[in-house]
Amino acid sequence: MLKVAIIGAGKMGISHLSILGAHPDVDVVGVCDTSKMVNDFLSRYGKFNCFTDYKKMMSETKPDAVVVAVPTKFHYSMIKDLLLSKVHIFAEKPFCLTSAQGEELVKLAKQQGIVNQIGYHNKFIGTFSEVKRLVNSGVLGKIYHFVAESYGPVVIRAKQDTWRSDPSEGGGCLMDYASHVIDLVNDILAPVASAKSSLLKKIYSTNVEDAVYSTLELENKLTGLLSVNWSDETHRKMTTSITIVGTNGKIESDANELKVYLKENPPEGYTKGWTVKYITDLTEEVDFYLRGEEYSAQLDYFVKAAMGKVPNTINTFESAWKTDRAIEMIKTSAI
Amino acid sequence: MERILFGDNQFFAVNHISDEKSRAQSIKFREDAAIIKTLDDARSLGINTFMCTTHERIGNICDVIRSQPEKYKDFKIFPCMPYAHKYANAVTELGIAGTLKQYVPGNFFGSMFKGGMAYLSKDYLSIMELLVDSEMKMFKGISTPVVFLQNVITDLFLGLRAYEVLAAFQHYVKKKYDAEAGFITMNMPKLLDALEGEGIKNPIICSSINKVGFRMSGGKEIYEETLRTRQVRAIAMQVLGGGAIAPKEAIEYVCGLPNIESILFGASSKANIQNTVENIHLFDSKK
């Protein structure tokens, strides 16, 4: 059994707690949150050992691994502190508020030799893994363009401020929302090397941007476009998609549906012209489902990595740091 | 429960495999009249139970049903609560406590939860009861013999081991609405264990059951074993596996399983509804 503690029982934390609570290899030894109401509920009904001070929780429960699901502004100091006590760490996205903070933690995590993972759950979605596999196999010929998009109804009217509307706390569409699809571009194509002429548009918010449009150049010189808007209520929920165009064809994929057009030489399972595959063909079932296979799969991967059963290569601090870096480039290039 | 239950995903652009299809559905059903027409199509084919989420537009549909009591006298609704997106968006914005403050009716929080007080079990259960009441309001005067908890909530409590809350839901809908409780889940065998542990015998559980094992957590085999050997009033949903299975083959599989009391499906066109209904009758008659 892996002893896991959770810091932060908000929307993501409580979802992680539920998934880990049902995981056969996990013993949840402690939960830390600042809300008395949440703590009382969890200790009364779930028999969880709840704390309001994470340091006290760490010293009393001595976990092997910790899930960090607190607002982004606390990530740096908390993760640094946890790294010094040599526990394995799964933290929510985005990684840190600045790439300098992230770089320091990446180095420290390597020195300490612990398993480290950030919650960019799109990497555990079957359609996107298949896109990555196809891109790496070279079937598209010479890739000359990409479009990375994400839309959803997060902020659809002017409303009260929370930490998500404060740029110094990790709020805003760029850090909170666009980070997902930027991370996907980094992973599938190549890390972002520079951003040009970025447009950060306020729609309903007063302090942060609600939409991000940018021209990106990747480390392999490929260029493409980023278009993200979290004030788009034409989408029922967050929709993330990527289009990749090459001399031998095109891939259009979202989390549900993968469409591939190939001029010639289709690999096994594909035909000349269009092939459409659905997530149902590309997803492995999980042992406990809460809100998407990918949420269970990412934690299962973390647990397995912490137990030494799989390598710690997906969503490492280092890959998430590259996403933080891209976010900074987009911010600095804003016109 | 009737053998065939009509679902509502198609009305609210919920499509598990294609955003394009969900866009087309949201255009097709932008008027409430289009929803009513499809429900009438389903009724004309013998389906008299509509299992639907507590989406705000269902309130409009309920108004239509109430206004024509003669026409809808045999019509039943199985409400599924809550409409999760409403709360999920609020939790992102306001946090868990803030969301409850916003949605729990009355001055409950103002009066009871002033700084530092300990929370009692009955407080949490009162919150649950108030939320159930607020979701049930729109169905007043309509027959709702079974009231369901949506999977995201059932499964959240399941993972948090808050089994008592699931049992309390069951007791409350019985007491207040004289209705059976139903539970939607993506983890049917595990949920059955939990409910039985709370002393609930033969519960109504609605879960994905399909030939390809889609969203059957832990694997198809353990579901089949559970249906074969245990006491549960099972409703099969997502029988087409999100569209991965040909309709006839899909229905043949589900009709061949033991202990499936009802089959839940949704469709946009009369032809598709008819096709599924005929397939269910065909394979049921072969048993």
Image (spheres, coloured by chain):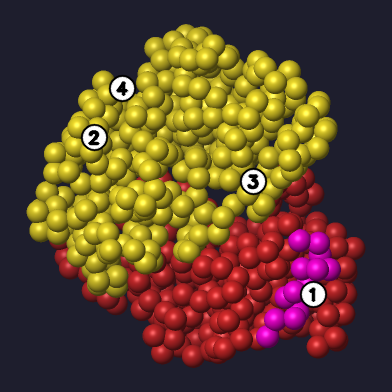
Chain colours: A yellow, B red
Q: Are marks 4 and 3 on the same chain?
A: yes
Quick check: do tags 2 and 1 share a chain? no
Query: Percent x, y for residue B218?
Result: 51, 68
Mark 4 or mark 3: name the one nearer the start of the chain: 4
Q: Nearer the viewer, mark 2 or mark 3?
A: 2
The residue type indicated by label 4 comes to Ser
Magenta residues, start to end: B245-258
Which residue in the protein does label 1 denote?
B252
Residue A144 image-quadrant placement: top right
Residue A210 shown left or right of residue B225 in the figure: left
**Element under label 2?**
helix
Q: CA distance from mark 2 to mark 3?
A: 34 Å
* Numbered label attached to residue A256: 3
Q: Image height check: is B132 above or below A64?
A: below
* Dot 4 and dot 1 within a common chain: no
The residue that disc 4 covers is: A99
The residue lying at 73 percent from left, 63 percent from top is: B240
Pointer 3 chain: A
Quarter of the figure with residue A322 = top left
Q: Chain of mark 2?
A: A
Per the picture, the main secondary structure of the magenta-coloured stretch is helix
For badge 3, the amino acid type reads Asn
User: Does the CB distance between marks 4 and 3 fall below 8 Å?
Assistant: no
